[in-house]
Image (cartoon, helix red, strand yellow):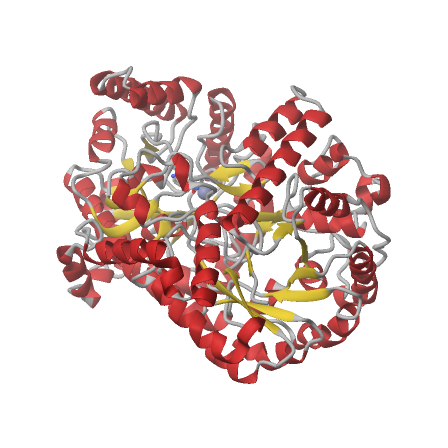
C-alpha cells in the first residue's frame, strides 16, 4: 500500500520548548523529571500532528535531547573511553557531559551535517571501541508511540553513515575494521525491534550523497544482506544529493525499499524507475524538508502519477529529508500578510501537503480540489508578483560584464596606492568588526523595536557606543579601526532587513545544534537596495577619528547561505543580485570617505557542494559574486574580507581569486597550522591570521601571541602580514576584550622591534 511519511520531524518545539527546558535543566532550575516531561509532551504533539494530517506512520527516534548522532552512539554503546561512562547505565546528565563537556573532558567535536546548518556531534571511535549496546531510549519511545495508538516507524542513522562520519582522536586506523562489530550491533537492534512487532524501519545512509571511496561503497551489499534479514523491513533513505550513480547498487540491496530526495535531484526518477525491482518500495521525497516554500501540488502530482504507473502500491511519498531543517509551524506567523503566508509551508504544513498529495494520487485530483485550487492560486500570484520579480534587478544582473568583477589594477599595483595614503606601520593591527554586544545595547534595541525608544534616542545610544569603541581603540593603539557593529542584531538579518526582497518570521526557528536555534531570513524576491544601509554609522565613526575607519559589510555568499532562499532561479543568480546591492553600498561608503572596506564571507566554504565534481562551478560563481561586490572601487581603496574557521587548503586558488587586498582568517586554535597552506600556495595578497581565540573570555599572554606572530612570519612575508584576533568580539565582555587587545598590541610592538 502506498504510504505517506516524513523522514523526521523537528524536535525543538514550535515555541522552542525543548530549548527552554534544556537550558533550565542545565542551570539547575528544573529537574530531570520536568525535562523528561517536556520531551514526552513534544513527542506526543509531533506524533499527533503526523497522524492527524493523515500520514501512515510516525517517525520515532528522531527525537534527541541534544543530537541524533550522539543518540546513535549511546544506543550502540559506543562511548569515548576518556569519559569513563558505562553505556548501559548512562544517565541523562552524562549524556549532556558528552555533548557539552565537563570539568575534566572536552565535549565531543561538533561539525556540520552535510551541507545543512545543523551541527552533529562527531562520534569518537578507536580501534578497541565496543558496540555492546547502550541506553534503551529508542525502545522506550517506540512503546510510548504505540501506547498512543500510532504506527511507529523507527528512524536510525545507518551503520555506514555512522561509521563514516565518526572520527578517532588517537592514531589513525581504518574505521572499516570496526564494521563487523557495528553491523552486529545494528542487527541486534533490528532484531529487538522485530521482536516488538515493528514492521518498517527507516535507516538513513546519507553518505551515499558524498564521493565515497570504493571500499565504503562495496560495504553496502554485505552489510545490508545481513541487516535486511533481521526480521524488519528496511527503508534505506538517501537525501541531499543525486544518488543515480548508485541506482544499480541500491536496486540490488537486500532492503525492502529506498528513499530518494527528488527535491534536490528530480532527475533521479528517470534513472531509478526503469530498473526498479518489482519487490521493492521506492519512496519519493517530493516535499522540501529544507526550505519553507509551499509545494506546487499540481506539478508534484504530475510527477507522482508518472511514478505510479510502473510502481503501483510500491510508490511511497514523503518529505525530501527530515523536516529537522524546517521551522515548525506557520500558524504562529500572524504578522506576515496573507499573500506571503500562502506561499509558505513550515514542517507542520508540510505534513498536510504530503497527506493531500497522497490523497490526490490515489483518489484523483477532484478529491483534493480545494487545496489544489489554493495551491494553484498561490503559484500564479507568486509567478506574477512584483514582490518577487523586479525587471530592473534582473536586467542589471544580465548587463554585468567581465570588467565588473575585476579591480582596475592587479594587487601588486594597488598595494602602493593604498599604502601611500594609509601609511600603516609594518604588521598593521585591526579587529574583525564587532565589539561587545553589551546588555545595554541589546536592551536599547529591544526597547526601540517595541516602540519604547524613539529613533533619535536609539541612534544616539548607538552613537555613544560607537564613540566608546573608537576611543578605546585609539587608546589601545590599533591602526585600522572599526565602528563596532553595535547597531547590528545579526550580520545577515541586519542587511536583510534593509534590502528589498527579504521577509522575516517571528518564530521560524531551526535547530543549529543542541539547544541553539537560528532564524534565517526569507529571501523571497529579487534583491535590491532601496537606500544606504551602513553609511551613516560608518561616516559617524570616521568623523570621530583621524585613523582609517574600516567599513563593515556582509558578503553576498554569506547572505545567501544563511537565508531561506527562493528556488525558482539559480543560487548563482540570487547571489549576483545581492552582490550588486553590496557593490552599491561599497561605492557609497567610498564616497563618504570610508576607504577601507571589509566584506565578510564566513560562509564561503560552507557553500561548497557535497560532490567534488560540482566544486569548481560553485567556486567560480561564488568568487565572481564576491568580486562583483568588491570591484566597483578605486584601486587605492582597500578591500578586506574575513572568513571564520575553515579548511582552506583545497580551495586556496579560489580564495586567492577573490582578490581581496587583505583576508583575515581564524587560525589561533589550529596553532597557525591553517596558515601553512597559504604559505605553501604562496597566497599573493595580504593576510591577517588570527592571533587569539575569541571564543572564550581567556586573555592570552603577550608571549603566547608573540609565538603565533613568529609562526606567521615564517610563512607570510612581513610586508603582507596583519595582526588581528580570530573573529568578531561581540560575544565577549569589555574587560577581557581590552586586556586581550592590549596584549595583542604589546606583542605587535615587540615583533616590530625585532624586525
Ligand atoms: N564582522 C563580523 C564580526 O566581527 C564577522 C563575524 C563572522 O565572521 N562571523 O562580528
Ligand atoms: Zn569570523
Question: Where residue 15 appears, x then y in whole percent?
Answer: 49, 32
* Direction from residue 745 to residue 252 in the image, left or right: right
Would you place residue 484 above or below residue 463 in this image?
below
479 or 158, nearer to the observer? 158
749 or 385, nearer to the observer? 385
Task: Kindly identify the residue that appears in the image at 65 percent across and 65 percent down.
Answer: 235
Picture quadrant where residue 182 is located: bottom right
Question: Where residue 519 appears, x then y in whole percent?
Answer: 42, 39
Would you place residue 275 above or below residue 369 in this image?
below
Would you place residue 471 above or below residue 244 in this image?
above
708 or 204, nearer to the observer? 204
Question: Where residue 171 appears, x then y in whole percent?
Answer: 77, 58
Would you place residue 192 above or below residue 443 in this image?
below
Q: Please tell me in which quarter of the rendered image ligand 1 is found.
A: top left
Picture quadrant where residue 618 is located: bottom left
Kindly tell me whether residue 713 is visible in this rendering.
no
Kindly tell me whether residue 547 is visible in this rendering.
yes
454 or 598, nearer to the observer? 454
* Direction from residue 90 to residue 440 in the image, left or right: left
Which quadrant holds the N terminus?
Answer: bottom right
Task: Kindly identify the residue that appears in the image at 66 percent across and 75 percent down.
Answer: 217
Question: Where residue 123 appears, x then y in whole percent?
Answer: 71, 51
Check the image and name the residue furthest to the bottom. 274
* Total count of labels: 0
Amino acid at each position: 500500500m502506498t504510504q505517506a511519511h516524513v523522514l523526521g520531524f523537528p524536535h525543538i518545539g514550535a515555541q522552542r520548548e525543548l530549548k527552554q527546558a534544556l537550558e533550565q535543566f542545565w542551570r539547575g532550575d528544573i529537574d530531570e523529571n520536568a525535562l523528561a516531561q517536556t520531551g514526552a509532551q513534544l513527542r506526543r504533539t509531533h506524533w499527533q500532528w503526523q497522524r492527524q494530517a493523515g500520514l501512515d506512520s510516525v517517525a520515532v527516534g528522531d527525537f534527541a535531547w541534544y543530537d541524533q548522532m550522539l543518540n546513535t552512539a549511546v544506543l550502540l554503546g559506543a562511548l569515548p573511553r576518556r569519559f569513563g561512562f558505562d553505556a548501559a547505565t548512562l544517565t541523562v546528565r552524562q549524556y549532556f557531559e558528552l555533548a557539552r563537556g565537563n570539568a575534566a573532558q572536552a565535549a565531543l567535536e561538533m561539525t556540520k551535517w552535510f551541507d545543512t546548518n545543523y551541527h552533529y556531534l562527531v562520534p569518537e571511535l578507536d580501534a578497541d571501541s565496543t558496540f555492546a549496546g547502550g541506553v534503551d531510549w529508542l525502545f522506550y519511545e517506540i512503546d510510548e508511540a504505540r501506547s498512543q495508538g500510532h504506527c511507529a516507524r523507527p528512524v536510525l542513522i545507518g551503520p555506514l553513515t555512522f561509521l563514516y562520519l565518526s572520527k578517532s582522536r588517537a592514531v589513525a586506523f581504518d574505521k572499516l575494521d570496526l564494521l563487523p562489530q557495528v553491523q552486529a550491533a545494528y542487527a541486534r537492534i533490528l532484531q529487538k525491534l522485530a521482536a516488538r512487532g515493528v514492521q518498517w524501519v527507516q535507516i538513513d545512509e546519507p553518505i551515499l550523497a558524498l564521493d565515497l571511496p570504493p571500499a565504503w561503497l562495496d560495504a553496502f551489499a554485505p552489510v545490508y544482506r545481513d541487516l535486511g534479514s533481521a526480521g524488519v523491513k528496511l527503508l534505506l533513505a538517501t537525501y541531499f544529493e543525486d544518488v543515480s550513480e548508485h541506482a544499480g547498487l541500491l536496486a540490488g540491496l537486500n532492503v525492502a525499499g529506498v528513499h530518494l530526495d527528488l527535491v534536490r535531484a528530480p532527475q533521479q526518477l528517470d534513472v531509478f524507475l526503469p530498473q526498479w525491482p518489482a519487490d521493492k518500495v521506492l519512496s519519493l521525497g517530493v516535499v522540501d524538508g529544507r526550505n519553507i516554500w509551499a509545494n506546487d501540488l499540481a506539478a508534484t502530482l504530475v510527477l507522482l502519477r508518472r511514478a505510479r504507473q510502473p510502481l503501483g502500491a510500491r510508490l511511497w511519498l514523503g518529505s525530501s529529508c527530515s523536516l529537522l531543517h524546517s521551522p515548525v509551524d506557520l500558524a504562529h506567523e500572524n504578522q506576515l500578510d496573507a499573500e506571503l503566508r500562502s506561499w509558505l509551508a513550515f514542517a507542520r504544513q508540510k505534513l498536510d501537503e504530503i497527506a493531500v498529495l497522497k490523497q490526490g494520487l490515489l483518489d484523483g485530483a477532484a478529491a483534493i480540489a480545494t487545496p489544489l485550487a489554493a495551491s494553484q492560486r498561490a503559484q500564479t500570484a507568486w509567478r506574477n508578483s512584483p514582490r518577487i520579480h523586479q525587471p530592473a534587478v534582473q536586467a542589471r544582473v544580465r548587463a554585468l560584464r567581465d570588467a565588473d568583477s575585476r579591480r582596475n589594477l592587479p594587487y601588486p599595483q594597488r598595494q602602493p596606492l593604498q599604502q601611500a595614503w594609509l601609511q600603516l606601520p609594518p604588521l598593521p593591527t585591526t579587529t574583525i568588526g564587532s565589539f561587545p554586544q553589551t546588555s545595554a545595547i541589546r536592551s536599547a534595541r529591544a526597547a526601540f523595536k517595541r516602540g519604547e525608544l524613539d529613533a533619535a534616542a536609539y541612534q544616539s545610544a548607538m552613537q555613544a557606543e560607537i564613540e566608546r569603541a573608537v576611543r578605546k581603540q585609539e587608546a589601545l593603539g590599533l591602526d585600522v579601526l572599526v565602528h563596532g557593529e553595535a547597531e547590528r542584531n545579526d550580520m545577515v538579518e541586519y542587511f536583510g532587513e534593509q534590502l528589498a526582497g527579504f521577509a522575516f518570521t517571528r518564530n521560524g526557528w531551526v535547530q543549529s545544534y543542541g539547544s541553539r536555534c537560528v532564524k534565517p531570513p526569507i529571501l523571497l524576491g529579487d534583491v535590491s537596495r532601496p537606500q544606504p544601509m551602513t553609511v551613516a554609522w560608518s561616516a559617524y565613526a570616521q568623523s570621530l577619528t583621524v585613523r582609517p575607519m574600516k567599513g563593515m559589510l556582509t558578503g553576498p555568499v554569506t547572505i545567501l547561505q544563511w537565508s531561506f532562499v527562493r528556488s525558482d532561479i539559480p543560487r548563482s543568480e540570487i547571489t549576483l543580485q545581492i552582490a550588486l546591492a553590496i557593490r552599491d553600498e561599497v561605492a557609497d561608503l567610498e564616497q563618504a570617505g570610508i576607504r577601507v572596506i571589509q566584506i565578510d564571507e564566513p560562509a564561503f566554504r560552507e557553500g561548497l557542494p557535497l560532490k567534488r565534481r560540482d566544486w569548481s562551478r560553485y567556486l567560480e560563481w561564488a568568487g565572481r559574486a564576491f568580486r562583483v561586490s568588491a570591484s566597483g572601487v578605486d584601486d587605492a581603496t582597500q578591500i578586506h574580507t574575513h572568513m571564520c574557521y575553515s579548511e582552506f587548503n583545497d580551495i586556496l586558488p579560489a580564495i586567492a581569486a577573490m582578490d581581496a587586498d587583505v583576508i583575515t582568517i581564524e587560525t589561533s586554535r589550529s596553532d597557525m597550522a591553517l596558515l601553512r597552506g597559504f604559505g605553501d600556495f604562496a597566497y599573493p595578497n595580504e593576510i591577517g591570521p588570527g592571533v587569539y581565540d575569541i571564543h572564550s573570555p581567556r586573555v592570552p599572554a603577550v608571549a603566547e601571541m608573540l609565538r603565533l606572530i613568529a609562526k606567521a612570519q615564517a610563512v607570510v612575508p612581513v610586508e603582507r602580514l596583519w595582526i588581528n584576533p580570530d573573529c568578531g568580539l561581540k560575544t565577549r565582555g569589555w574587560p577581557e576584550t581590552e586586556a586581550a587587545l592590549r596584549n595583542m598590541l604589546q606583542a605587535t610592538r615587540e615583533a616590530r622591534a625585532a624586525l
